[in-house]
Amino acid sequence: METQINIKKLSQYCFVCGYNFENEPEESFRLVVFTNTCDCCLFQYGVDETYFGPSGLMSYRQDWIEKGLPYRGEIFSEYLVWTLNDALKQLHNLKKVNMDMYFNHLIALDNKDWTSDIDEDRIKIYWNIFRSGSS
Ligand SMILES: [Zn+2]
């Protein structure tokens, strides 16, 4: 009898905004796992999905975009330079993940609408609404 062991590859990128968890100084926060919170969009894994339902990741992403893609909840920050290019570059990290890398297979099955596709034009519109005069 054959025993197959599947070692699941966990994601280092946020499924909502593409933030790279490897930027975290503490090793225990460097993967998307239960209770880890994204430092950029503030999505709390294992908690917010249950609150936002089976489309939680996508609806949270849309909401984050429509709030102007804030970093840590802030549009303007004294300690951080967060540009449109940074946001777009980060969102392109979504191409490096798929729902099979999600730590909770039930959430992965639920989130059928999850996509790594991003609408750059829409993002630029919301970015500019919240930062009039800058690009
Ligand atoms: Zn995030």
Image (cartoon, helix red, strand yellow):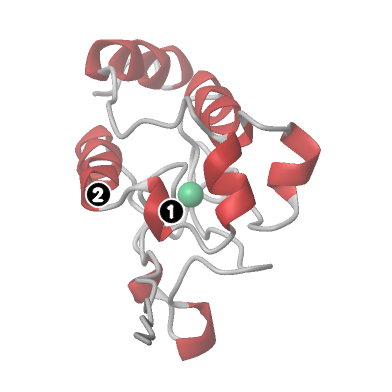
Q: Position of residue 43 (x, y in %)?
A: 61, 49
Q: Position of residue 18 (x, y in %)?
A: 35, 48
The residue that disc 2 covers is 93
Residue assigned mark 1: 14
**Residue in view at x 35 percent, y 71 percent:** 9
Instruction: Tell me which amino acid carries mark 1.
Output: Cys
Label 1 Cα neighbours within 10 Å, binned few <14 / some 14-19 / many ≥20? many
Residue 11 locus on image (x, y percent): 38, 64
Badge 2 vs badge 1, beta-carbon distance below 8 Å: yes
Say which label, 2 or 1, has the lower sequence index. 1
Residue at the spot 25% in from the left edge and 11% down from the top edge: 121
Q: Residue at x 36, y 67 (%)?
A: 12
Is residue 26 something that shows in the picture?
A: no
Q: Residue furthest front?
A: 1
Q: Rounded to the nearest whole Å, what is the CA distance between mark 2 and mark 1?
A: 8 Å
Instruction: Give the side of residue 48 with respect to residue 39, left or right.
Output: right
Name the kind of residue labelled 2 in the image. Asn
Q: Is residue 58 above or below residue 9?
A: above
Question: 70 above or below 102?
Answer: above
User: SS of the residue at dot 1?
Assistant: loop
Above or below, comparing residue 88 to residue 33 in the picture: above
Question: Quick check: 60 left or right of 87?
Answer: right
The answer to whether residue 120 is left or right of residue 16 is: left
| Residue behind label 1 places its C-beta within 8 angstroms of ligand 1 | yes
Q: Number of labelled discs?
A: 2
